[in-house]
Structures are given as structure tokens and as C-alpha cells.
Amino acid sequence: MSLILIVEDEKHLAEGLRFNLEAEGYQVQLAETGEAALELLVSGEQTFDVVILDVMLPGKDGFTVMSELRQAGNFVPTLMLTARGRSEDVLKGFSAGADDYLTKPFDLSILIARIRGLLRRHEWLRTSLNHENAVSTSPKPRDTFTFGDKSVQFDLLQLRVREQTFPLTLMEANVLRYLIEHEGTPVSRKSMLEQVWGLHEDTDTRAIDNFIVRLRRYIEDDPTRPRHLLTVRGLGYRFVAIPAKKD
Amino acid sequence: MVVAGRRKSIAFFIALGAGLISVILLLYIGGVLFDWRSGILLFLGILLLTMIISGVVLNTAFLVREIRRNEQHDAFINAVTHELKTPVAAIRLYLETLQTRAVDEPKRKEFYGIMLQESDRLLTTIEQVLRTGRMGAASRKPNLLPIDLSGVVGECLARARILHDIRPESLEYHPGPPVTILGDLDEVRAAILNLIENAVKYSGSDVKITVETASVDGKYVSLRVRDEGAGIPRTELKRIFKRFYRVPGSLAARVKGIGLGLFIVRSVAKRHGGRAWAESEGLGRGSTFVLQLPIAK
């Protein structure tokens, strides 16, 4: 089921949109400010399939949110939905990185059609990429990393531990991949932020710790005494595929 | 970018004006030192010089004002566009929803309620804009009739309580002795509603508003609307009454408005021979708006 984020501070509009999109079978989440939307999108806790973004928001406006999102390397399909319909506004929206632009008041069926269009384009891109991969490198080994009785299937975004399967979010998978690529060597929080999230500002690096806590819950037998995902004090983390025998 | 460009042109023209004046002064002083005896020429020169200087000063002042006004105009157009189109968008969205989907009874009722609220909002914006237009037309004189002020205030408070769902203790009214004013009922009501509306809007979630009336020297009656909300910086206390003006910053983005409410309040006060002003200890410390109108003899 596709997950849609609506960034809109007008409650009535936001609720009306939510009602309709849910009726269409989409999952919907609301954000009232640009800051809240950026946090949701950049943290990567959830992967949104489409974002509907208003321009006149309290705090950061839609144009700013759009360009900051793209700078952070998040290319989620985004439709800007706003009362401002002058050509300079539309152009500003597209140059900030929007995929589509619709002015209020809008026709509900057209809005839904455009959302479908964005989702479809996304889907086509994914299939064509998969197809290319299949043609060029078949039979390509699965994008999987196995350690002990656990294996991470990056292409399927899941983690198998013995008989159990845990779904991973895209960001969780990326964090794990980054740690695995540097197996055995300590990785700083800052470099993770830069390499995985594409952030270069002095963002609070503690956000990463939440990811690690969640990952430990999946891959550690006892999350309070980690053996694979070790903390390197004052620096960051280190991944160990085959831990030394317990004493 | 546009704003930065305008700032630059304001700075440029002020510098140009100042430069021209100083060049003229220098030339003139030089001239006087060389030839101080010709009295008539001196007199004519001073006259001419004063005219040139005042011309340059006036030109610069008007230019700066025009640029400022343009800037506010843009902001106003954006705000009005938003305030007109958003309710229409919401009403349209809900109508289409009701038309195309199966909606159960409670939801249906909720949707009707939302549409009514949004159409009220739309009407309020339209009325504000039309009223501003009427106020500007000098030919339209207010239709003056004796009004019982506390009655109008009570009516406005009742409306605000229903509209914003405010508990009576959050919006208190301390009426002074009853007074009758000579006024245009529609205009006076609009002014009072605007003041209460503002107090609610800028109070955030914790609304605490006191409205009181008192007579001043037996000649005037003053209506004070006090809130404990966002407050106003000292430098902005006068400007907020200007047409289209909104205090720049994050508050203006968070609280929706088109910058006409206080302009209407002040216009109504002036048209009735009274005045209106604001008092505030500063940001975050609440504010008081006073509307003073003459008492009917």
C-alpha cells in the first residue's frame, strides 16, 4: 500500500484530502509545518511514496522545504498544491524540485489522477531498473549479506534471523549496508550522516542512535549486550560480523 | 530577491538625494564667499536653493513610500489569494467528496459543518476587502444614528464566542456605565469585531481576553480589548494600523490575515471623530487595543 504524506496547515483541507486518499486505498500521514515534514522525510523512519506539499506554511514555506529535501538527497515524488498560481510561483516550485504543481481550488479527480501518475512513474522506474539489472548481470547474485544465522536481503529490504523475517525501512537498510561495508572498522556518526543521509550541516548526530537501537533489536540476541553492532565511545559504531567467542 | 533589489534602490535614491544636496550646498557657499554684496541675488538664490532642496527631499520621500507600498501590495495580493482560494478549495473538496463517495451520516454532518465554517471565513475576507474599498471612498459618509455601545459589544462578544468556541471566562466583559454614541452601526460593529477577532487570533491556544468600556472626561467612551497573547514590538505599534501592513516575521506566517483589520478599525474611529491605538509591553507580553469614540450629546 502506498504511503502519502500531506503537508498542509489548513486542517479542513488536510482532513478532506486524507479522507479521500484513504478511500482510494492509500495510507496517509499529515504534517502541519515544513519543519515537521522535513523531519519525517529526512529521518527515513518511514518511506513515503508521494508527498503533497502546500506553499504557504507557518515557518519554512513549501519552496524552502522542497529545495532542502532535494539537497538532502531525498527524491520522493512531490506534488505542490497551493493557492499561488502565478507563473513565477509555478516556475519557482519546479525549480525547487517539485515533480508536479496544482493550484487550489482543484478538481479532486484530477488531483487523484496526478498522484496516480506520480506513483506509476515511480513504479515504472523501479521495474525498468530491475529489468536492466536482470539483463546486464543475470544471473546476478542476490544483494544479500549473511553473518552467523542472520542475513540481510538489501534488495528485499528485509532481515532474516533464523526463521524470522523483519522488514527494514530504506534508511535502516542503508545504515546497515554502510556499517557492513566498513566491517571491523569504527565508523563515526558524522560520516554516517554524510554518507547515508547526505547531510553536511551540523545536524544532531544523536538521531543515528535511534536507528542503532532499532537495528540492535533485530540483529542482536540480547540488545542490551550487543555483539555485532558495537558502540565506539566518543566516535560512533563498529560492525562485527563474527563476534569473538563469549567468555 | 525582489525585496533585496528594492532595498538597494531605496538606498541608492537616498544616497543620490543626499549627494545632490551636498553638491548644491558646497557650490552655494562658495558663491556667497566670493560675492556677498549682491543682496537681491542672495535672496533669490536662497529661495531657489530651498525650492530645489525641498523638491529633491519630497521626490525621495515619495519614491521610498511608493516602493514600500508596492512591497506591501505584493504581500497583500498573496495573502488575499490565499484567504480567498483556500476556503473555496476546502468547500469544493468536501462537495466533491459528498458527490462521489459513500459518506455515512455523522461524517456527512461534520462535512456540512466544515463547509459552513469555510464559507463564513470566505465571507469575512470578502467583507473586509469591500469595507476597505468603501472606507477609501470619501463620498460615502457614515450613516450616523444613536447606538447603545454596550449592546453592540455584547453582540460582538457572543458572536466571537460561538465562532471560536471560547468559554465565557476566557473572554470577559466589564461594561462601564451605559453610553450612547452617534455612529454607523455596521461600521462600529465591524471595528469591534475586528479587535476581538485579532485578540483571539494572536492569543494562540491559551485565550484570555478582557473587554471593558469606560467614559473619558464625559466626552468620549473608550473600549479596551486586552489580550495576553503575542504582543507587539514598540516600533510596530503605529505601523500595524496601516493598510496592508503586517508585522514581518514568523508570526505573520503562522497567523493568517490580510492586513486590513486594524486599518478598518482606525478608519472607523476617524470617520466617527474618535481615534484608535495600541499598547503593548513588547513581544510575548500581550497587547491592548483602544477604540475611543465621542459620546452622543
Image (cartoon, coloured by chain):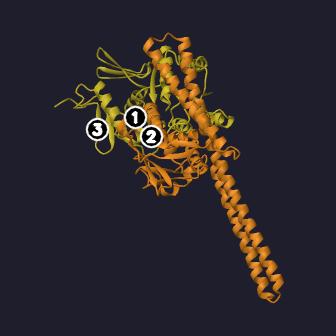
Chain colours: A yellow, B orange
The front one of B40 and A173 is B40
User: Which three-letter amino acid code belongs to the residue tagged 2?
Assistant: Val
Image coordinates of residue B50 in percent, x first then y, are 75, 73
Image coordinates of residue B79 in percent, x first then y, are 59, 39
Mark 2 neighbour density, 10 Å: few (under 14) some (14–19) many (20 or more) = many
The front one of B209 and A38 is B209
Q: Does mark 2 fall on the same chain as mark 1?
A: yes
Question: With respect to residue B50, does B136 lie above or below?
Answer: above
Alpha carbon distance from label 3 to label 2: 51 Å
Alpha carbon distance from label 1 to label 2: 9 Å
User: Which three-letter amino acid code belongs to the residue tagged 1?
Assistant: Ile
Labels 1 and 2: the sequence-earlier one? 1
Q: Does mark 2 fall on the same chain as mark 3?
A: no
Query: Can residue A91 be seen at all in this image of the molecule?
Result: yes
- What residue is shown with label 1? B166
**CB contact under 8 Å: marks 3 and 1:** no
Image coordinates of residue A37 in percent, x first then y, are 46, 33
View extreme (top): residue: B102
View extreme (left): residue: A247
- Residue A231 is marked as 3
State which chain disc 3 sits on: A
Mark 3 neighbour density, 10 Å: few (under 14) some (14–19) many (20 or more) = some
Alpha carbon distance from label 3 to label 1: 53 Å
Image coordinates of residue A73 in percent, x first then y, are 51, 34
**CB contact under 8 Å: marks 1 and 2:** yes
